Image (cartoon, grey):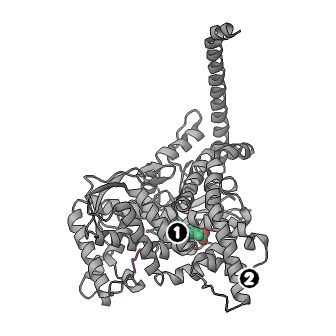
């Protein structure tokens, strides 16, 4: 028998590999057909009078156009902007994750930014793009108001007042990763900033003990990455196949959110118990931490549904908060660091930024108070300019039409229910009508006017990092402008100021390029930098 097996094994193996290959080929062809049908249906929902970019009369034209939207979207958005937006016309871009995007010209930006959710919905769009139903689940938690409310009512109001504890975490993280001995080290830019941003923000989200636990912090950021990856896969499939595909595609999502939940649940259970005991007995020897968990538990005491009060639901909200906060902040920090240290005159630029940080810190007795961070005008401008030139691109202010009869745009065109409308971020960020020398990274573009004599007397639009406009859109604009931007901007400025004050980075010979993926531009996550401590610690 064993001789027979040995003799026939190669034959059986080749037969098996043939069958497997055949099955995969069949699956591929099936997917291609099904995806093309799905894409055709989506494309047909857009008013036929509108011009498209990125489509051609060719076999399987719909799925091939979407594929072009996956690999070449920056180019498509820019082409469309130059040809149509500049002529005040509307155009359509095929995308992989959002379906066809109806792109409005700048003249309709302000109108778009102020439409109420009942007509043009922001969350419908985010949820569909990231396939929240499958990648995140828990619709009762994701569509609840508690996170947005607490960011606006608590986090933003306290931003600045908690900088002393945030600084401790920034310093602790940097000393651990960059060293204190003055030796040059090669470290990943994105990785080191993820850890620092994650630890600093989580100091305010979950408190001192958990924020420096990298198993927890990295699980949160991996969960954010898992959501993107699994959503890209799911966009390939028609609705009826998604539940099955999602079960496999979201295995990492469940694993990483599970790790974060493992740490969060006991913390929240204990906080609820302590807060209840303190309320019942004011002499109870326990001091309430000033963090997001405390604010959230306090808010949950006013609510009465399971989705707003259970330990699970509250813990899951913190996972979602990490999803919204950490990778976004890390991307903006990474772009700013790469743009500053790759600029042609980076030595002078770094010297000017460092001089500002030293001067401001000295003026504020060595403390990064709210007022001190607000005075970092040059650094603020450099980050804002980096977000303009290296921003994520794609569709900004993307909104889904909610109303059954569709929506009538300002030019009279009716766009049907479930279409997605928005504006082109890169088109606007690179439009000469709003910015001079659009392709140049001009770090002091926004701070230069402030340093001119007599600036105080000039009536000028405020152009700080947190100020959104229809032509500066990294945080979006209007009723859904990112509520976390005050906290994010505060932390990015403190992180970069600490690097300027305490570390040397070797300038990059050229800017490690961002890559275009889906309808966005992604930072080079593998780029490394040479960094050393300046003021060596004993
Ligand atoms: C540099 C960092 C960040 C960037 C670039 C960013 C960007 C954005 C963008 C583009 C939106 C979509 C707005 C729209 O639909 O028009 C958004 C929404 C949101 N962001 Fe941020 N964000 C950042 C940091 C944060 C942080 C730190 C938090 C939490 C503390 C946060 C919480 C949220 C929430 C809750 C929403 C949903 C708001 C709504 O639907 O009304 N973000 N953000």
Residue 320 lies, with reference to residue 509, above or below; the image says: below
Q: Is residue 448 left or right of residue 108?
A: left
Q: Residues within 10 Å of mark 2 (few under 14, many from 20)?
A: few
Q: Position of residue 40 (x, y in %)?
A: 64, 42
- 412 and 73: which is toward the camera: 73
Question: 442 and 344: which one is in front?
Answer: 344
Q: Looking at the image, is mark 1 or mark 2 earlier in the sequence?
A: 1
**Which element type, helix, strand or loop, lies under badge 2?**
loop
Q: Which residue lies at the image location 38% right of the left edge and 57% below the top edge? A: 189
Residue sticking out furthest to the right: 305
Instruction: Assign the C terminus to one quadrant of the image.
Output: bottom left
| Dot 1: element | helix
Dividing the picture into quadrants, the one containing residue 57 is: top right
Question: Residue 334 sits in which quadrant?
Answer: bottom left
Residue 289 seen anywhere in this rendered image of the structure: yes
Which tag is nearer the camera, tag 1 or tag 2?
Answer: 1
Task: Between residue 254 and residue 154, name the one nearer to us.
Answer: 254
The answer to whether residue 52 is left or right of residue 45 is left
Q: CA distance from mark 1 to mark 2?
A: 27 Å
Q: Quadrant where the N terminus lies? A: top right
Within 10 Å of disc 1 (Cα), the crowding (few <14, some 14-19, many 20+) is: many
Q: Ligand 1 appears in which quadrant?
A: bottom right
Q: Quadrant of residue 177?
A: bottom left
Q: What residue is shown with label 1? A: 211
Name the chief secondary structure element in magenta.
loop
The dot on residue 420 is none
User: Is residue 434 something one can see in this rendering?
Assistant: no
Q: Residue at x 60, y 54 (%)?
A: 227
The reply to whether callout 1 and callout 2 are in contact (CB within 8 Å) is: no
Report the magenta residues as a range.
Answer: 459-465
In the image, residue 502 lies in the stretch drawn in magenta: no
Q: Give the numbered dot on residue 302.
A: 2
């Amino acid at each position: 028998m064993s001789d027979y097996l040995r003799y026939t094994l190669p034959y059986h193996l080749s037969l098996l590999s043939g069958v497997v290959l055949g099955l995969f080929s069949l699956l591929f062809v099936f997917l291609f057909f099904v995806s093309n049908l799905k894409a055709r249906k989506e494309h047909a929902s857009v008013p036929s009078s509108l011009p498209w970019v990125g489509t051609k009369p060719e076999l399987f034209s719909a799925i091939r156009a979407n594929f072009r939207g996956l690999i070449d979207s920056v180019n498509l958005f820019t082409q469309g902007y130059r040809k149509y937006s500049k002529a005040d016309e509307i155009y359509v871009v095929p995308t992989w994750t959002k379906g066809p995007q109806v792109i409005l010209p700048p003249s309709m930006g302000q109108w778009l930014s102020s439409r109420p959710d009942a007509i043009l919905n922001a969350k419908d769009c985010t949820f569909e793009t990231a396939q929240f139903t499958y990648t995140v689940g828990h619709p009762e938690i994701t569509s609840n108001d508690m996170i947005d409310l607490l960011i606006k009512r608590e986090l933003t109001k306290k931003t600045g007042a908690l900088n002393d504890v945030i600084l401790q975490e920034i310093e602790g993280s940097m000393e651990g990763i960059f060293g204190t001995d003055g030796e040059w080290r090669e470290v990943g830019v994105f990785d080191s900033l993820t850890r620092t941003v994650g630890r600093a923000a989580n100091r305010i989200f979950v408190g001192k003990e958990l924020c420096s636990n990298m198993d927890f912090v990295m699980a949160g950021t991996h969960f954010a990455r898992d959501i993107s990856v699994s959503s890209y896969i799911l966009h390939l499939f028609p609705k009826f196949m998604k539940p099955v595909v999602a079960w496999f595609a979201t295995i990492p999502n469940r694993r990483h959110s599970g790790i974060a939940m493992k740490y969060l649940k006991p913390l929240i259970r204990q906080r609820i118990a302590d807060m209840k005991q303190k309320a019942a007995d004011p002499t109870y020897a326990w001091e309430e931490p000033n963090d997001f968990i405390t604010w959230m538990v306090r808010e949950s005491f006013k609510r009465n549904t399971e989705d707003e009060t259970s330990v699970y639901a509250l813990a899951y909200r913190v996972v979602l908060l990490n999803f919204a906060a950490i990778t976004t902040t890390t991307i903006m920090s990474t772009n700013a660091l790469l743009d500053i240290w790759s600029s042609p005159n980076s030595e002078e630029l770094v010297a000017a930024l460092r001089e500002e940080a030293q001067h401001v810190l000295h003026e504020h007795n060595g403390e990064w108070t709210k007022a001190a961070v607000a005075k970092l005008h040059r650094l603020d401008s450099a980050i804002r300019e980096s977000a303009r030139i290296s921003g994520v691109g794609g569709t900004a202010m993307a909104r889904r039409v909610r109303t059954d009869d569709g929506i009538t745009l300002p030019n009279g065109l009716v766009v049907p229910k479930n279409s997605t409308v928005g504006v082109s971020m890169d088109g606007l960020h690179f439009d000469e009508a709003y910015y001079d020398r659009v392709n140049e990274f001009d770090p002091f573009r926004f701070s230069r006017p402030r340093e001119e004599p007599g600036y105080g007397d000039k009536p000028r639009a405020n152009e700080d990092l947190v100020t959104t406009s229809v032509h500066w859109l990294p945080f979006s604009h209007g009723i859904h402008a990112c509520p976390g931007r005050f906290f994010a901007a505060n932390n990015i400025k403190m992180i970069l100021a600490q690097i300027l004050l305490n570390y040397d980075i070797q300038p990059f010979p050229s800017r490690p390029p961002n890559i275009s993926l889906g309808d966005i531009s992604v930072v080079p996550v593998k780029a490394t930098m040479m960094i050393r401590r300046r003021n060596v610690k004993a």
